[in-house]
Image (cartoon, rainbow, N blue to C red):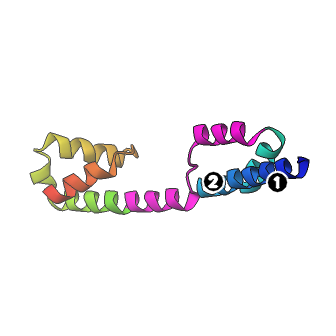
Amino acid sequence: MFLFWFVVWFLLCFAIGSIASRLNRSAVIWFFVSFFLSPVIAGLFLLIAGKAENKKEVELNDDIYDMKASEFVSKYKANESQYDQNEKLKNMFDDINNNKKIEIALIDGALSFM
């Protein structure tokens, strides 16, 4: 009977490690946390912690932001006299030049307007 519960415990710990891996977290660490603590408690902690950001995704988002921001700046400078009259575009241009991050969706909207 002990062997049965040990196998169930082990499989639950393995499941927690597998879920952790899908959430960009260390499967090995979460396996051992669930093994020594409890698969249920570790599972709750894992759900609370949520998905970790993938470094590659963050770098890709930064590259996309830089590309769109530079496109905005170049279009703004090409017709600066026209766009200076639009207060929102002028503020966005100033924010980008001051290295203030703004939402990519706002830049996209401005680029479609330009």
Residue at the far right: name it: 2
Q: Nearer the viewer, residue 112 or 2?
A: 2
Q: Residues within 10 Å of mark 2 (few under 14, many from 20)?
A: some
For badge 1, the amino acid type reads: Val
The amino acid at mark 2 is Ile
Q: Residue at 25%, 56% (x, y): give it.
A: 108
Residue at 44 percent of width and 58 percent of height: 61
Q: Secondary structure at mark 2?
A: helix
Comparing 114 with 20, the one in front is 20
Q: Label 1 belongs to which residue?
A: 7
Q: Please say whether residue 21 is visible from this viewpoint.
A: yes
- Which label sits on residue 36? none
Q: Is residue 62 left or right of residue 82?
A: right
Residue corresponding to mark 2: 19
Q: Is residue 55 magenta?
A: yes
Tell me if residue 114 can be seen: no
Residue 18 lies left or right of residue 62; in this view the side is right
Q: Main secondary structure of the magenta part?
A: helix
Residue at image point 38% right, 57% down: 65
Residue 51, horizontal then vertical, whole percent:
56, 48
Total number of numbered discs in the rendering: 2
Indicate the position of residue 88 as horizontal and vertical percent values: 18, 41
- 17 or 105, nearer to the observer: 17
| Separation (CA) of disc 2 from disc 1 | 18 Å
Tell us which disc is closer to us: 2 or 1.
1
Farthest front residue? 1
Percent of width and height locating residue 112: 17, 59
- Label 1: which secondary element: helix
Image quarter for residue 102? top left
Residue 73 placement (x, y as % from top left): 27, 57
- Assess disc 1: are there few (<14), some (14-19) or many (≥20) residues with their C-alpha within 10 Å of its C-alpha: few
**Magenta residues, start to end:** 38-66
